[in-house]
């Protein structure tokens, strides 16, 4: 470039039609060669969105309907909500971790066989709520969302919905909870 | 649009830059021989793109590296193709580098004023070789692990600082987490950054001097510009490179069985005799064979260093009369030498039966670990533990190391290797099968059975006829060879023993046909009482402790021969291997070492399970 060319370079204008074909071909071929590795890479990047992959990554260890054994009914005393971990076989990409906590629930016994079960995850931004006896409710430590004993959010709370209650059943004296996580930050309760 | 571009140009001057980039003068017109540099830039871009996406899924630690690569290869969408492209483009880069170097030397493009650019190119060559070397380890499979270990051990023979250099490269005393983190940082961080830096300089200096037009005749042709004529030729060349790469990626079809290979996970305790570097380093591997003992450093460093040093001096040599021709000759000599050494390495490997067995074993392990992952998943301790606990994998190794010195397994030592020494004990390939029992009854003195012990000795004493013409051999000669024991009776005894093994906790050999009840009963009767023609029954010498009226009054001869209670079952075999000299088995006649203190309980279980075909099988 710095050395002066001995002759003027032929400009594309000299051969308009041939030049156009060449340009088009050059762009097409260059495009193909460049895009193939990018597409293959992008495909693997999008892997987490495949339903098959999502299904494989779900924890196992629940019964057929998705209920996990949490505790014995006898261990619950009336009134105060108690937090319990949910134990399941966790999958993490290539690894399988047997019997690990995958989340927590608050269980409150309201009558002999009546329970209130909440996922501890705050529906606002996903922190874990704590039970506060003095407030008679659940307080989120992150943005101060406050939920009553029945899970209803206070009017001034940043949370858009109530605490996520979970289905439960009692079998042979054990409490089983249909544990699931819900999408965070929206008003509706949508399973994740 | 036009005004927007004008606004952009006003602020950035991009049009000038673009013009500079695209309308470079190509003296004498575009040529195919100018494409090599562009294909190298292209392959490097492919490596950047695919490498970045691989990075998003790769986890460098000794418990996750192989596992994450396995996940990329087998679970992620087109992950196998991504890995395959990265793997084969790396090899294409080496080939293209060699072509580029040849073209530069032949065209004399290293001469003044292009000396510095030639040196920059040689530095780029070394960086690419460094990328290959570091990348080979990252999957943490047996191949990469052992081949790279050789490379870092060679670094360790550097005079004075060798030990420190090796420890720094390895990140500790031995291969582990920090070997991977260091190699990965080099492979994905430092070396690509250096490559980009030197590549920018290389292209900048190249643009400064322009293309080396080879001869006056060509220079008299019409000049052209880089865009679009040369770009089109470069594009076609890149497409050809990509097509070649894709051919290798897809050579076994479309799916995770294709693409780049992934061996079994690295197992530091398992010597791997199939370890070879990637094909383009094979010549160095072969070269080292010619440097015995302390002289290794000459083959590993002095000579390669001298050759590299001479390449750097080429611009000066080229100034002299005939210097240019000498350079060309030298380069061809080097490439011929590399070609010859590579050929020798491949030829020696092809002729090496031990290497062939090792490669087969390595392939089998790679297949097996895939089955085990599919069956069991990978626990937090990593995939190598699946193989360590696997009877199918460990059985042959345990047998070869512990039993194969005397015994054979279908003629070999368990691992597929056929020892040159003659066997001194039975061939256990079909232990626990009806055929095994049949041979023990009809031909106990055969070469595959007790006959082999003729060649052996125990505590310095030759065994001679202790077993080869022992009580069992004599009994068979008397009662079977002459036809007193009928074929139906032999079948019945076999059936009885097979059923006994199956009824023992843990069971007998897997995959045998069911035995009919009547046959088993007939066998039991013969075992206890013999027949009119065979007066010495099995029970006459062999103990059999089952709750049955037939076996209530034992013979005086009991313990003259091994107790056959549960014979052929895992329990019997494990007890036997633990202590064959126990009075239940051979007692004082024993001539086999006890393995109770030599093998762990788990190892004994794996050995027994392998001998009895009781390994985990893939679900159909």
Image (cartoon, coloured by chain):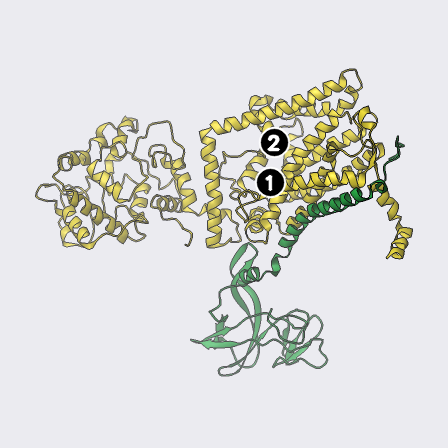
Chain colours: A green, B yellow
x%, y% of residue B50?
66, 47
Give B181 or B618, whichever is nearer the viewer. B618
Residue under circle 1?
B137
- Chain under numbered label 2: B
Quadrant in the picture for residue B286: top right
Q: Which numbered tag is attached to residue B224?
A: none
Q: On the picture, is B278 further left or further right than B351?
A: right
From this view, report whether residue B407 is shown above or below residue B612: above
In percent of width and height, residue B256 lies at 54, 49
Q: Is residue B168 visible in this depiction of the protein? A: no
Split into 4 quadrants, where in the image is the N terminus of chain B? Answer: bottom right
Task: Give the residue displayed 30% in from the left and 42% down from the top.
Answer: B431
Classify 10 Å Cα crowding around label 1: few (below 14), some (14-19), many (20 and above): many
Res B532 seen here: yes
Compare marks 2 and 1 and give the one earlier in the sequence.
1
Q: In the rendered image, which residue does mark 2 sit on? A: B281
In three-dimensional space, the C-alpha distance between marks 2 and 1, rounded to whole angstroms, equals 14 Å
In percent of the image, x 71 and y 72: which residue is there?
Answer: A143
């Amino acid at each position: 470039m710095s050395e002066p060319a001995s002759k003027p370079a032929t400009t594309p204008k000299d051969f308009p039609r041939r030049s156009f074909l060449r340009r088009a071909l050059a762009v097409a071929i260059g495009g193909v060669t460049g895009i193939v590795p990018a597409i293959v890479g992008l495909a693997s990047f999008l892997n987490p969105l495949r339903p098959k992959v999502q299904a494989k990554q779900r924890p196992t260890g629940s019964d057929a309907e998705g209920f996990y054994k949490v505790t014995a009914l006898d261990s619950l005393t009336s009134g105060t909500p108690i937090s319990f971990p949910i134990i399941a076989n966790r999958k993490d990409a290539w690894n399988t971790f047997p019997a690990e906590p995958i989340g927590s629930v608050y269980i409150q016994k309201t009558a002999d066989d009546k329970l209130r079960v909440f996922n501890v995850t705050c529906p606002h931004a996903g922190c874990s709520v704590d039970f506060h006896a003095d407030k008679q409710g659940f307080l989120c430590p992150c943005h101060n969302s406050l939920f009553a004993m029945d899970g209803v959010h206070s009017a001034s709370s940043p949370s858009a919905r109530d605490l996520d209650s979970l289905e439960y059943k009692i079998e042979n004296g054990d409490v089983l909870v249909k544990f699931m996580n819900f999408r965070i930050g929206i008003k509706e309760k949508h399973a994740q | 649009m036009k005004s927007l571009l004008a606004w952009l140009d006003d602020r950035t001057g991009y049009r000038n830059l673009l013009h500079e980039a695209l309308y470079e003068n190509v003296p004498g017109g575009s040529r195919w021989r100018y494409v090599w540099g562009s294909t190298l830039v292209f392959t490097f871009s492919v490596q950047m793109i695919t490498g970045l996406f691989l990075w998003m899924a790769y986890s460098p630690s000794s418990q996750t590296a192989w596992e994450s690569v396995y996940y990329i290869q087998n679970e992620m969408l087109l992950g196998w193709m991504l890995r395959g492209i990265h793997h084969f483009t790396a090899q294409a880069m080496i080939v293209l580098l060699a072509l580029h170097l040849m073209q530069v030397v032949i065209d004399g493009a290293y001469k003044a004023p292009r000396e510095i650019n030639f040196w920059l190119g040689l530095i780029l060559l070394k960086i690419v070789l460094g990328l290959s070397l570091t990348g080979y380890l990252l999957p943490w499979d047996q191949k990469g692990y052992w081949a790279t270990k050789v490379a870092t051990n060679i670094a360790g023979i550097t005079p004075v600082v060798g030990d420190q250099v090796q420890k720094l490269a390895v990140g500790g005393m031995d291969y582990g987490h920090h070997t991977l983190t260091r190699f990965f940082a080099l492979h994905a961080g430092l070396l690509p950054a250096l490559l980009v830096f030197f590549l920018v300089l290389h292209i900048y200096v190249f643009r400064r001097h322009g293309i080396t037009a080879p001869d006056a005749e060509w220079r008299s042709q019409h000049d052209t510009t880089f865009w679009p004529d040369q770009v089109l030729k470069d594009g076609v060349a890149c497409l050809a490179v990509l097509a070649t790469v894709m051919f290798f990626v897809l050579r076994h079809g479309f799916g995770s069985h294709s693409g780049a290979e992934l061996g079994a996970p690295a197992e530091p305790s398992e010597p791997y005799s199939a370890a070879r570097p990637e094909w383009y380093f094979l010549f160095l591997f072969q070269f080292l064979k010619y440097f015995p003992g302390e002289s290794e450093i000459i083959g590993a460093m002095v000579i390669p260093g001298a050759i590299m040093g001479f390449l750097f001096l080429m611009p000066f040599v080229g100034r002299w009369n005939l210097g240019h021709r000498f350079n060309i000759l030298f380069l061809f000599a080097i490439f011929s030498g590399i070609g010859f050494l590579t050929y020798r390495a491949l030829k020696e490997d092809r002729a090496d039966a031990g290497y062939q067995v090792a490669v087969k074993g390595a392939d089998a392990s790679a297949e097996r670990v895939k089955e085990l992952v599919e069956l069991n998943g990978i626990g937090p301790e990593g995939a190598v533990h699946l193989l360590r606990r696997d009877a199918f994998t460990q059985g042959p190794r345990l047998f070869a190391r512990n039993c194969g010195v005397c015994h054979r397994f279908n003629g070999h030592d368990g691992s597929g290797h056929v020892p040159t020494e003659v066997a001194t004990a039975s061939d256990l390939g079909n232990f626990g099968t009806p055929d095994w029992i049949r041979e023990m009854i009809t031909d106990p003195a055969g070469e595959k059975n007790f006959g082999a012990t003729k060649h052996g000795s125990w505590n310095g004493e030759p065994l001679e006829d202790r077993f080869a013409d022992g009580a069992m051999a004599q009994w068979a000669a008397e009662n079977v060879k002459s036809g007193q024991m009928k074929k139906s009776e032999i079948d019945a005894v076999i059936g009885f023993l097979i059923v006994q093994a199956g009824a023992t906790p843990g069971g007998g050999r897997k995959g045998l046909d069911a035995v009919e009840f009547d046959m088993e009963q007939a066998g039991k009767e013969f075992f206890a009482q013999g027949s009119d023609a065979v007066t010495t029954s099995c029970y006459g010498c062999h103990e059999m402790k089952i709750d049955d009226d037939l076996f209530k009054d034992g013979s005086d001869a009991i313990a003259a021969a091994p107790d056959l209670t549960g014979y052929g079952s895992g329990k019997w075999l494990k007890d036997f291997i633990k202590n064959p000299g126990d009075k239940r088995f051979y007692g004082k006649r024993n001539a086999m070492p006890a393995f109770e203190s030599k093998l762990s309980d788990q190892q004994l279980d794996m050995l027994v399970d392998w001998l009895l075909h009781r390994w985990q099988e893939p679900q159909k």
